[in-house]
Amino acid sequence: MLTASDLIAFERDIADAFNAGQIRAPVHLSGGGEETLIEIFREVGPRDWVLTTWRSHYHALLRGVPPAQLKADILAGRSITLCYPEHRVLSSAIVGGILPIAVGIAWAIRRANLPERVWAFVGDMTSMTGVFTECAKYARGHDLPIRLVVEDNGRSVCTPTQEVWGSERRKNEGKTRHYRYESSWPHSGAGVRVNF
């Protein structure tokens, strides 16, 4: 398994490439919470699916996507839409876009009675949306083999999540796991974070 230092070094390399103009597309870097994420991935089984958002570099690396392949895809402008079905990794840049897909895969696993699970990673902004609420409720109600992981940096893009939504963040319940981290990168790109 990769270490936190491995993950951080990969993102630093991508940030350097972005700042050198080698990536001519949006890039969303992971940073912060490496140890917690590594711990979560120790629970991910070899046949489990990992579905994630536009901030998916760490997830892909921890799932076993070769770093050289991942870097090539990021350099080609696919940072926010990385999909590796051969590694059982799917991502979407659409807020909440992976959640119905994750629930559908979980249903297929349950119907086939397979010893697999789905891990759906979302940010705290997404956890406040209707699609998250509906998917979490449906997964609980039908006891689907899915775990929703909320990666909470306290931001909805560049604004405090609680300020945007006017309510408290969700807590762990049923099929949901929640962890807090401090992001070391801006929402997009590799420059200086701008707060509104």
Image (cartoon, helix red, strand yellow):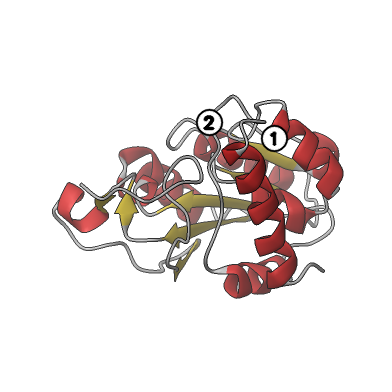
Q: Quadrant of the N terminus?
A: bottom right
Place of residue 42 in the rendered image (x, y in percent of width and height, measured from the top left)? 74, 71
Q: Quadrant of residue 162?
A: bottom left
Place of residue 83 in the rendered image (x, y in percent of width and height, measured from the top left)? 71, 34
Q: Which residue is mark 1?
A: 74
Q: Which residue is mark 2?
A: 26
Horizontal arrangement in the rendering, residue 176 relative to residue 164 (left or right): right
Q: Name the N-terminal-most of marks 2 and 1.
A: 2
Q: Secondary structure at mark 2?
A: loop
Camera-nearest residue between 156 and 114: 156
Say what amino acid the circle numbered 2 marks. Pro
Residue at (57% x, 26% y) in the render: 25
Residue at (28% x, 62% y) in the render: 169
Compared with 195, 97 (above or below) is: above
Horizontal arrangement in the rendering, residue 19 relative to residue 62 (left or right): left
Say what amino acid the circle numbered 1 marks. Ile
Image mark for residue 134: none
Compared with 35, 153 (above or below) is: above
Horizontal arrangement in the rendering, residue 31 relative to residue 46 (left or right): left
Camera-nearest residue between 77 and 19: 19
Q: Is residue 169 visible?
A: yes
Local crowd size for mark 1, using a 10 Å CA cut-off: few (<14), some (14–19), many (≥20): many
